[in-house]
Image (cartoon, rainbow, N blue to C red):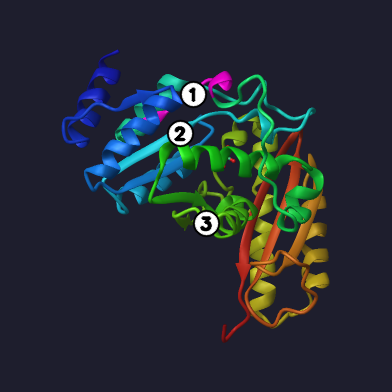
Amino acid sequence: MTITILLDIQTYLFNGGRKIEVITTIDEMQKRADGWRQSGKTIVFVPTMGFLHEGHLALMRRGREYGDILVISIFVNPTQFGPQEDFETYPRDFERDRRLAESVGVDVIFAPQNDEMYGERFQTYVSLEELPQHLCGLSRPNHFRGVATIVSKLFNIVKPHVSIFGEKDYQQLVIIRQMVRDLNFDIRIVGAPTVREPDGLAMSSRNNYLSPEERRSASVLFQSLKLAQKSVAEGERDARKLINAASAHIKSVPHTQIDYVTICDPETLDDVDQIGGPVLMALAVKVGKTRLIDNTILKPKGN
Ligand code: PAF
């Protein structure tokens, strides 16, 4: 109790004496955004599905540098989950999220209910032709349609000038950039580096699902990316050899099941055979029942 009160006082002071505001309706959010825009304020937006961790907080701290009003959304978006996926069990703790967001100076949390975002007769989706046909899109067929749709809706509701996305979800970032170009959203998209645990595991709300033993196995994703980086630094240019070495390493660790290990063009996501310039190495691995993703850019010397 005492700790919570101290934390609240500290965050209240951090935020220049302003308490964080929670908005739950589209109408109210749009009116507030219009008001800020009319008074010349720059709106920065970090969309999230909540259960915030240090990775999200890093995006928010970054966001503070880009404008006057920092808005985050907390919405577990049903349309980006497949029928067998974890929509129902996705971790949720709004009070904890509110305190964490306030501690890094967020001004407003937009936290709508499902009905507010998807009315009964909802029928308009945003889907991209090619970028979702790679990496995670292959095993999560409608995932990026759900992401592009909710992000478009959030952009129209929060009306940001700048929006920040993590590079951990690299394919999502590339898709959002493409969508913003294709649909002429007047929004600057900023990518922010992946935040990692001390053993290299990329921070994710889903790490929470891992048992202690699975958690130990999960560092294999980062280890395999490091292995590939080292081989490229030593002169290896054959993508297949790098993929095979990473896959063998992952398979040697208990509780792991590979979804994909890919080396591809960082913009088109098309497969690459020979590494002649910077390429994306991306992987998705199930550790126990939890699907984890990670990626790195492999840069041959001189690039
Ligand atoms: O990256 C996420 O957490 C989600 O995909 C996003 C961008 C908030 C859309 O629901």
Total number of numbered discs in the rendering: 3
Three-letter amino acid code at the position of disc 1? Pro
Image: magenta residue range: 109-116
Q: Residue at x 58, y 19 (%)?
A: 115
Residue at numbered disc 1: 112
Per the rendering, the mark at residue 184 is 3
| SS class, disc 1 | loop
Q: Position of residue 213 (x, y in %)?
A: 69, 35
Query: Which mark identifies residue 233?
Result: none
At numbered mark 3, what does the secondary structure look like: helix, strand or loop? loop
For label 2, being within 8 Å of ligand 1 is answered: yes
Query: Is the residue indicated by label 1 positioned so its CB lies within 8 Å of ligand 1?
Result: no
For image coordinates 77% across by 56% down, the residue present is 134
Q: Looking at the image, can residue 12 be seen?
A: yes
Q: Nearer the viewer, residue 32 or 262?
A: 32
Q: Is residue 260 above or below residue 30?
A: below
Q: CA distance from mark 2 to mark 1?
A: 8 Å
Residue 128, x across and y down, in percent: 70, 52
Residue 217 lies in what quarter of the image? top right
What is the three-letter code of the residue carrying label 3?
Asn
Residue for badge 2: 73
Task: For marks 3 and 2, give the one nearer the viewer.
Answer: 3
